[in-house]
Amino acid sequence: MSPLPPGSYRPPADRWGSFTKLAARLPEGSVVVVDRTVARFHPTLLPTLEARKPRAIIQLVGGERAKSLISLQKVLAGGINLPRSGTLVAVGGGTVGDVATVAAHLLKRGVRLVQVPTTLLAAVDSSLGGKGAVDLVVRGRVVKNPAGVFHYADETWLCPELYATLSDAQVREGSIEAWKMVASLDASLFKRYVRTPPSLEKLVKDARGLKEGVCAKDPYEHQGLRRVLNFGHTFGHVLESLSRFKLSHGDAVGLGILWALDVGRHLGITPEPVAHEVERALARGPGVLGRDRAAELAHRASLKDVAALLDADKKAGAQGELRMVLLTAVGTAEVVDVMPKTWRALWPAWTRGARP
């Protein structure tokens, strides 16, 4: 067990192997949060966990609904008897991992956390970096991630057999998040990916390595260095909300990247050849959805609703400016304050599915 207080920053302890083998590491008397769908697709999962005599196994319905205060209350109640020296285990995708991270931070003012990502998206991104958050309903709209914590996992178990049942859409959205980091952080790796598509395991290892390189320099976002990881997230979160979360997070980020490239070109920050190269690579590589899907969502929304979602976003500034991540070159990005008039000027083209 780590000598550090539960949840404090530590280099990631990634453990690859079968779930059955890694579960033998789990202390008896732990509390486990499991995505109900994952348990159904992997029938040996629950018996394997039960053999470790947990205090409780809490099943949640995955997806964005897992990130509600109701789900958080369910996990906290299930873990009420967990001692501060105990372990909370999150077995599921990013949303289950998010609510479990918040619960691990709150229970007894911090308990040990083990992440077991079961989606590619969670493996490459959300299970690393210590962040956990829940959504809130504000004036009838779901606002993503306004209430959250930093609570780093002691270990992350990466079990390839859990990814074997993922749909093509789930693989795509995880791949988009990985390519996002490569496009904004590592030009040489981006070129290699364009030449030779990576295997799933390499994609996960590369993406986690890139993200950890950023998080290690700014583990609690005190310096703003981690903002570069939000490439595509500003408008990605808007599109996700406008779809009422029928659009997956990874697909939303992919469309958000296209719009971020447009903003960068409009401001003269992202050179046209860079924007063209990245957009083409994302279409051919992970398979980012087309602009017509973003237009379909944008067309049904009022500018007032969009502005309200942007204002509520944790990346918005006090004067309504958007702190957006924009590419200056492949593998290089900077955070830029973008005034509302900029995205409003691009909005008509976006609602038509056009590249401004």
Image (spheres, rainbow, N blue to C red):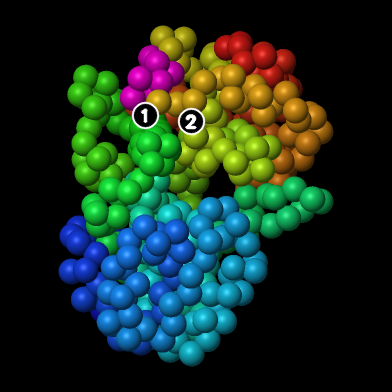
> Which span is picked out in magenta?
277-286
From what the image shows, is residue 128 above or below residue 169? below
Quadrant hosting residue 288 = top left
Q: Residue at x 18, y 69 (%)?
A: 21
Q: Residue at x 27, y 62 (%)?
A: 157
Counting from the top left corner in percent of width and height, residue 255 is at 53, 28
Q: Residue at x 69, y 26 (%)?
A: 298
| Dot placed on the residue nearer the N-terminal end, 1 or 2 | 2
Counting from the top left corner in percent of width and height, residue 256 is at 55, 30
The residue that disc 2 covers is 254
Check disc 2 and give the amino acid type.
Gly
Helix, strand or loop status at disc 1: loop
Tag nearer the camera, 1 or 2: 1
Q: Contact, CB < 8 Å: mark 1 with mark 2?
A: yes
Q: Residue at x 22, y 32 (%)?
A: 198
Is 335 displayed left or right of 353 in the figure? Answer: left
